[in-house]
């Protein structure tokens, strides 16, 4: 289900959109530990730097795909936090779609935000689903989820995750590649994948089926990670509609064939290792808190 509307949103007015370039972070998260203004400002700054990096000419459309996590931290939460932050000079306006908003920063720079959800399938794989009219259920088989996403005309991405594509899960995903291709799904590369490292074999196999790889940041639930969104992503040729950005993005993704250019840089091995340790510590603390709550 697309994100619910917070109170006070204003619908944006459409303007004639000329062909340009879309800079897309396909795997963003917003956590309540983040400062909403810093989140939007850093994402905007990172994407503007990316435009210079790739030498974009003409109009640029900056876009984040923001996936709701299991903790229910999602795009509507960002919109509400931004709206209630009296220090902020950012605003978030509604569109004709339930799943999308347009953020305006300092009254000039626009950032397109499209919401969705992050699922864990029965096989233990992650799946991102964006612009679905209804929510999909966690814990269902990957093939079922992909077919459900296609039936809802949603964007579906199977993102890279540390250890998620190893051993049996990796073999299963390889066997499922024809289904991904049939359902128009994508694979996702991540800023968290350490650099330098070997390109995952599944990325190479996916090309045989015409499956493209989209890139995103996958920020972690730590305050310092608020600087990350928009720093790694994909470059698409085309434009986004202010009234229906999700629909126009889906049209672009279907039209663009072949490999997709990537901008930004992935994490170093040192940063990757530190992040993994921090996540394990966070998970252990969470388990201890849940046990205490059970016996209190």
Image (cartoon, rainbow, N blue to C red):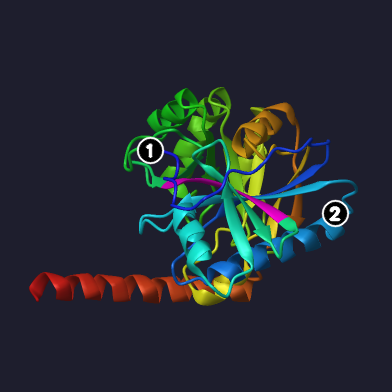
Task: Tell me residue 282's x, y (percent).
Answer: 38, 74
Dot 2 or dot 1: first in sequence order is 2
Helix or strand or loop: what does disc 1 sit on?
A: loop
Q: Which residue lies at the image location 39% right of the left edge and 34% below the top edge?
A: 134
Residue 34 percent across, percent down from the top left: 50, 71
Q: Name the residue under label 2.
A: 54
In the image, residue 1 sits, relative to residue 271, either above or below, namely above
Residue tagged 1: 135
| Magenta segment boundaries in residue numbering | 110-118
Towards the viewer: 180 or 238: 238
Q: Which one is nearer the viewer's eye here, 251 or 197?
A: 251
Query: Residue, x 55% and y 58% (percent of image)?
Result: 218
* Distance from Cα at disc 2 to Cα at disc 1: 35 Å
174 with respect to 212 (left or right): left
Q: Looking at the image, can residue 126 be seen?
A: no
> What is the magenta segment's predominant secondary structure?
strand
Point out the image quarter for the N terminus: top left
Q: Quadrant of the C terminus?
A: bottom left
Say whether marks 2 and 1 touch (CB < 8 Å).
Answer: no
Nearer the camera: disc 2 or disc 1:
1
């Amino acid at each position: 289900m697309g994100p619910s509307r917070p109170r006070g949103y204003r619908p944006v007015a459409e303007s004639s959109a000329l062909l340009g370039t879309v800079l897309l972070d396909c795997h963003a998260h917003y956590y309540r530990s983040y400062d909403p203004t810093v989140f939007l400002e850093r994402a905007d700054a990172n994407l503007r730097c990316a435009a210079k990096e790739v030498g974009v000419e003409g109009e640029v459309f900056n876009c984040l795909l923001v996936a709701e996590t299991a903790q229910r931290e999602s795009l509507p939460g960002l919109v509400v936090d931004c709206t209630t932050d009296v220090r902020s000079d950012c605003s978030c306006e509604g569109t004709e779609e339930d799943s999308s908003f347009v953020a305006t920063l300092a009254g000039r720079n626009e950032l397109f935000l499209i919401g969705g959800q992050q699922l864990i399938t029965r096989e233990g794989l992650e799946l991102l689903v964006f612009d679905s009219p209804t929510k999909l259920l966690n814990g269902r088989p990957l093939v079922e989820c992909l077919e459900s996403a296609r039936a809802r005309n949603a964007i579906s991405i199977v993102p890279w995750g540390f250890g998620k594509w190893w051993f049996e899960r990796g073999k299963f995903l390889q066997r499922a590649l024809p289904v991904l291709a049939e359902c128009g799904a994508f694979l996702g590369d991540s800023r968290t994948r350490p650099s330098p490292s070997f390109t995952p074999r599944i990325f190479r196999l996916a090309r045989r089926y015409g499956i493209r790889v989209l890139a995103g940041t996958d920020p972690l639930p730590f305050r310092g990670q608020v600087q990350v969104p928009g720093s790694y992503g994909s470059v698409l040729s085309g434009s986004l509609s202010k009234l229906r950005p999700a629909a126009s993005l889906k049209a672009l993704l279907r039209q663009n064939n072949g490999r997709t250019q990537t901008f930004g840089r992935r994490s170093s091995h040192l940063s990757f290792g530190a992040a993994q340790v921090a996540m394990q510590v966070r998970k252990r603390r969470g388990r201890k808190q849940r046990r205490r709550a059970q016996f209190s």
